[in-house]
Image (cartoon, rainbow, N blue to C red):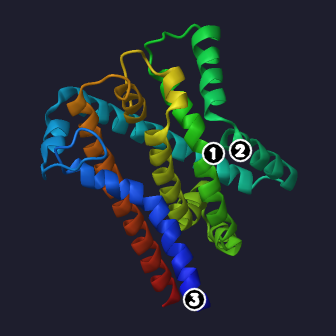
């Protein structure tokens, strides 16, 4: 009976979390213009999504921004984690604390401060993409740091020392010994950085050029008076994002399970 109660509570929680998303998925395959009345089955929203240049440009720009920001953040976060891990204890504690500030700090504060610093203080062009990229890197890099650090703590330091004894330089030992062992953490940090960049609204709002929109800013603006077909096409976009996330999670779980099986052999 206790097990059934646990399963029941878990089912209710999962239903509460995923039912709104599943409802949106259903409506994306209908001709309905509002949530509440399901009409006939249709791919109209998906056709609109993939044939509207405005939507395609917005999606392409969002993905490009996310990939560039995630790559830079992954490099900085990984380098920062390795440097912190091999620093003295007091320095490592200080760096760990500093890294937590951007994570805990509100996005609106980060976005506004970057806008003030780069655009107002340094006089950077408002139509420049540099503040936007800097803002997203600032958001994502600390999360990469926290993803890589646990993998570093799991390392066998004797392997690094053995590599040095066998003639490797510290750089060669880093590339050949340390980095291959922390690749899962680096990959997880990169995926998390991409997700955070795609999802961010406040930092993007304060730092983006006036003529540029990401998915998050476009969706918010679309709910304030866009055409009905554009609004319903965003249902299709949300469905595709949800499916891509599920596929990514399944791939990562399969990859991690496969790695654990290989390690146990």
Residue for point 60% across, 49% down: 143
Give the CA separation, mark 1 to mark 2: 6 Å
Residue for point 21% across, 43% down: 32
Dot 3 alpha-carbon crowd within 10 angstroms: few under 14, some 14 to 19, many 20 or more: few
Q: Are marks 1 and 2 in contact (CB under 8 Å)?
A: yes
| Tag shown at residue 142 | 1
Dot 1 alpha-carbon crowd within 10 angstroms: few under 14, some 14 to 19, many 20 or more: many
Give the CA separation, mark 3 to mark 2: 41 Å
Q: Earlier in the sequence, mark 1 or mark 2?
A: 2
Residue for point 52% across, 47% down: 74
Which of 27/77 is in front?
27
Which of 154/171 is in front?
154
Q: Earlier in the sequence, mark 3 or mark 1?
A: 3
Tell me: 112 left or right of 209. right
Disc 3 secondary structure class: helix
Residue for point 40% across, 41% down: 67
Dot 2 alpha-carbon crowd within 10 angstroms: few under 14, some 14 to 19, many 20 or more: some
Q: Earlier in the sequence, mark 3 or mark 2?
A: 3
Task: Locate residue 246, reporting x and y percent.
Answer: 37, 61
- Above or below — where is 7 with respect to 255? below
Task: Locate residue 132, reporting x and y percent.
Answer: 49, 26
Which of 199/184 is in front?
199
Quarter in which the N terminus is drawn = bottom right
| Residue bearing mark 2 | 99
| Tag shown at residue 18 | none
| Residue bearing mark 3 | 3
Which of the 4 image quarters holds residue 157? bottom right
């Amino acid at each position: 009976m206790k097990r059934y109660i646990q399963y029941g509570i878990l089912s209710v929680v999962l239903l509460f979390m995923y039912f709104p998303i599943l409802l949106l998925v259903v409506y994306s395959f209908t001709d309905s213009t509002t949530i509440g009345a399901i009409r006939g089955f249709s791919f109209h929203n998906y056709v609109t999504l993939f044939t509207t240049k405005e939507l395609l440009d917005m999606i392409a720009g969002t993905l490009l921004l996310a990939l560039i920001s995630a790559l830079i953040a992954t490099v900085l976060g990984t380098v920062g984690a390795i440097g912190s891990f091999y620093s003295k204890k007091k320095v490592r504690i200080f760096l760990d604390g500093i890294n937590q500030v951007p994570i805990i700090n509100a996005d609106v504060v980060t976005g506004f401060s970057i806008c003030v610093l780069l655009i107002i203080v340094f006089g950077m062009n408002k139509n420049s993409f540099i503040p936007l990229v800097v803002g997203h890197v600032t958001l994502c890099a600390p999360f990469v740091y926290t993803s890589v650090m646990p993998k570093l703590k799991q390392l066998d330091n004797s392997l690094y020392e053995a590599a040095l004894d066998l003639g490797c330089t510290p750089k060669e030992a880093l590339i050949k010994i340390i980095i291959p062992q922390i690749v899962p953490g680096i990959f997880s940090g990169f995926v998390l950085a991409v997700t955070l960049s795609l999802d961010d609204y406040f930092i993007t709002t304060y730092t983006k050029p006036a003529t540029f929109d990401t998915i998050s800013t476009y969706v918010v603006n679309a709910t304030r008076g866009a055409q009905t077909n554009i609004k319903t096409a965003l249902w299709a976009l949300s469905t595709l994002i949800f499916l891509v996330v599920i596929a990514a999670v399944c791939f990562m779980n399969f990859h991690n399970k496969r790695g654990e099986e290989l390690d146990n052999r």
